Amino acid sequence: MNERKILLQKAVIIVKNWVPQNADNVEWVRPHTGALCCVRLKPAVFTAEVDVFYAHATNAQVQLASAECFGDQKRIIKSGLGFFHCLY
């Protein structure tokens, strides 16, 4: 197995463990392949507050881009799984 695949598998495990810890606020569809992860802010929690969420992320120096850039809902966040591996 090549090094990139091993790193991506480790990143999936990190996100897989993080999502249940934050299940009141987010949900995700686990990727079967590839290096992108989509996390969705739960609509029941983030109604009009989606912009506030992104403002807080910016204030905390967390760089996020909503999936709105890709024609999807603003409450969906797309991130490269390689980034999650770098965090741990």
Image (cartoon, rainbow, N blue to C red):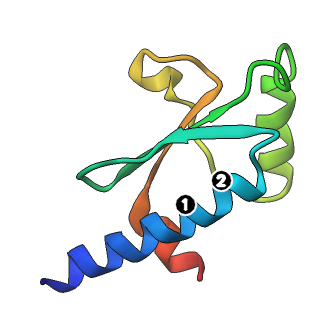
Please tell me which residue is depicted at 22% across the width and 74% down the height of the picture.
5
Please tell me which residue is depicted at 87% across the width and 30% down the height of the picture.
52
Counting other residues with Cα less than 10 Å from the Cα at mark 2, is it few (<14), some (14-19), or many (20 or more)?
some
In 3D space, how far apart are the residues under numbered discs 1 and 2 (Cα atoms)?
6 Å
* Residue 40 image point, x, y percent: 61, 33
* Residue 61 image point, x, y percent: 76, 59
* Labelled disc at residue 16: 1
The residue beneath circle 2 is: 19
Please tell me which residue is depicted at 23% across the width and 52% down the height of the picture.
33
Quarter of image, res 39? top right
Amino acid at pointer 1: Lys
Question: Would you say the residues marked 1 and 2 are in contact, meaning their CB atoms lie under 8 Å apart?
Answer: yes
Q: Is residue 1 left or right of residue 63?
A: left
Let me know if residue 55 appears in the view. Answer: yes
Viewer-nearest residue: 36 or 33: 33
* Residue 20 image point, x, y percent: 69, 54
Amino acid at pointer 2: Val
